[in-house]
Amino acid sequence: MPKLAAIQICCHVGDVDANLEKARNLIQDASKAGAEFVCLPELFTTGAAGDKTSALAEPIPGPTTDELADIAKNNHVYIAAGVAEKEQCTEKLYNASVLISPDGELLKRYRKVFLYLGEKESFTAGDESCVCDVSFGKIALTICYDYVFPEYIRHLVLQGAELLVHSTAWLTTDECERWNYNRGAYRAMGMTRALENGVYFISANHWGNYDVAGNLRGIGQSSIISPWGEILDEVQEGEGIAIADVDFEVPTKWRENVAPYLADFRNGKKRLSFL
């Protein structure tokens, strides 16, 4: 039964070395607590660095993934982490995430498919999903805004994903607060994606300033959620680690006895031409 950990950080915007050191310490703590798989937030090494993003972005593999590989190997954990990528040939920028094995191998790179508002001015959208095998099952890498689109998430689950891995920078802003944005919506969508697909969900978020000016503010609530919507652990505020054991045998019984949503979807799809 693997133990998962979602790490919530207060980002030093634009300071890659400081954020990597912070991640190293928190991952070490998670490993000591028994974690085998660790998720870090979106763009955790840079935050929203504005005009500095291009200078801070790196190729994959590159210095940051090398550092993450060292951390993974020293702590015997998988690491999923959001980073700013610069493609060497084209110099295009991508909002990306990587998956590192406990042996320090770069297993996968995923480029965020759905870019939110001003992100389109800096980043190029990815065009491939990422579902892959790890030692305890099949996982899907997603980044922040991706999970707003249930059709995309269902696509990942239909490819066999048993765990949705969500590196995010879920924020509030002055504009959000003028609309009385309910911060619980972030958590509610995570619960919904877990429930409607009958899979586990892990989300690692930022807390506090995500840009230098403090216009973008991470709302925390990093968590691990079961297929039946139970919050297995969470970090509501500040820095910290949400950690929980997950049993990938149990969801089968949940789906059979209570929530046959995927099976019924497949049956309905056969009858309805528009699905």
Image: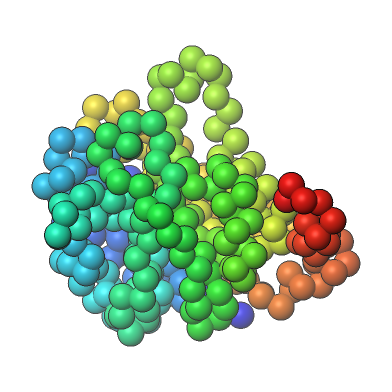
Question: Is 48 on the left-hand or right-hand side of 4?
Answer: left
Residue 264 image offset from top left, x and y in percent: 83, 59
Question: Is 242 on the left-hand or right-hand side of 116?
Answer: right
Q: Residue furthest top?
A: 178
> Can residue 4 be seen in this snapshot?
no
How many numbered discs, if any? 0
Q: Residue furthest front?
A: 273
Question: Is 36 on the left-hand or right-hand side of 269?
Answer: left
- Which quadrant: the N terminus? bottom right
20 or 268, which is in the foreground? 268
Residue 136: image quadrant is: bottom right
Q: Residue at x 55, y 24 (%)?
A: 181
Residue 35 image offset from top left, x and y in percent: 47, 73
Name the colour scheme. rainbow
116 or 127, which is in the foreground? 127
Q: Residue at x 49, y 15 (%)?
A: 178
Q: Residue at x 20, y 35 (%)?
A: 50
Question: Is 223 on the left-hand or right-hand side of 143?
Answer: right
Residue 49 image offset from top left, x and y in percent: 21, 39
Residue 234 image offset from top left, x and y in percent: 55, 53
Q: Residue at x 44, y 29 (%)?
A: 172
Q: Residue furthest right?
A: 257
> Can residue 88 be seen in this snapshot?
yes
- Using the image, determine if residue 128 lies above or below residue 235: below
Residue 198: image quadrant is: bottom right
